[in-house]
Structure formats: C-alpha cells, structure tokens
Amino acid sequence: MSWNIEAYSIYLGVTAYITIVVGYMFHKYGFFLILNLFNGNVQAAKSINNLLLVAYYLVNLGYLAISISTWPELLSIVQVLQLLFHKISLILLVLGILHFNNIFWLNYLSRRKDFIKFLTH
C-alpha cells in the first residue's frame, strides 16, 4: 500500500500553515521596518511590504510544488515520517534563509537612506 496521498496531505497542511503564519507575521511586523526605511512614506512602505509578501508566498509555493514532485513511493509509515520530517525541516530552513536575507537587505538599505529618498521623490 502506498502512503503518498496521506503524506502529501499532512505535508501540505503543515507547510501551508507554517507559510501562512510566518508570512502574516513578516507582513505585519516588517511594515514598521520598511516604513522606517522609507522615511515615513506610508504609501511606498505598504506597496513594498505587499510586494514582499506576494514574492514570499510565490517562492514558498514554488518550492513546495518542486519538493512534492521529487518524492519516491512511500511504502511504510517509517518512510512517511522520515520524509515528512526531512521535507518540513527544509521548509523551515528556507524560511529562515528568506528571513535573514530580508533583514540583511533592510539593514543594508537603511544605511543608504539617501538612495531610498531619491527613489521615492
């Protein structure tokens, strides 16, 4: 008996929840960092924040789709658990890398506020 359908369901449920919750938190709390970056320009901060959220969701959904397409046939519950833990940990690692990448660029750009001011005026 193949366990792939059950594994897909669990994987998509857990990773969708993680992706949505983390994306919401990035969007909600990252707005203030971006607002500071754009010197209080609310319109520009909202636009960039929404753009980052859409890009975040697209990257994660693309990774999920590619990840599922490479799964082997799962014949035991042990294989299901091993693969689920491996794939979910990779998703968490990707989310961490995306977070640190965003923080790096926000920090870098906040040091170049003169350039941002030039772009928004």
Image (spheres, grey):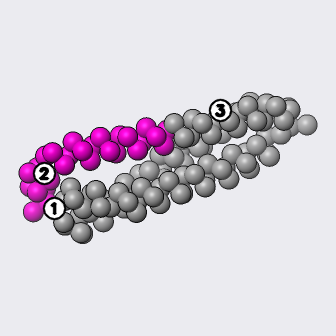
Q: Which residues are magenta?
A: 94-121
State whether residue 95 appears in this view: yes
Q: Is residue 35 magenta?
A: no
Q: Amino acid at mark 3?
A: His
Q: How many marks?
A: 3
Locate residue 99 relative to residue 74 in the image: left or right: left
Name which residue lies at 66% across and 50% down. Answer: 14
Farthest residue, direction right: 1
Locate residue 72 relative to residue 2 in the image: left or right: left
Q: Residues within 10 Å of mark 1 (few under 14, many from 20)?
A: some
* Prevalent SS, magenta region: helix
- Residue 45 rendering spot, x and y as whole percentages: 26, 63
- Residue 19 rendering spot, x and y as whole percentages: 54, 52
SS assignment at label 2: helix
SS assignment at label 3: helix
Q: Amino acid at mark 2?
A: Lys
Q: Which residue is mark 2?
A: 113
Mark positioned earlier in the residue sequence (1 or 3): 1
Q: CA distance from mark 1 to mark 3?
A: 42 Å
The C terminus - image quarter: bottom left
- Identify the mark at residue 86; answer none if there is no mark: 3
Mark positioned earlier in the residue sequence (2 or 1): 1
Name which residue lies at 15% across and 45% down. Answer: 111
SS assignment at label 1: loop
Q: Which residue is mark 1?
A: 39
**Callout 2 touching callout 3 (CB < 8 Å):** no
Q: Amino acid at mark 1?
A: Asn
**Callout 2 touching callout 1 (CB < 8 Å):** yes
State whether residue 51 appears in this view: no
Name which residue lies at 42% across and 42% down. Answer: 98
- Residue 73 rendering spot, x and y as whole percentages: 79, 32
| 83 or 28: nearer the viewer | 28
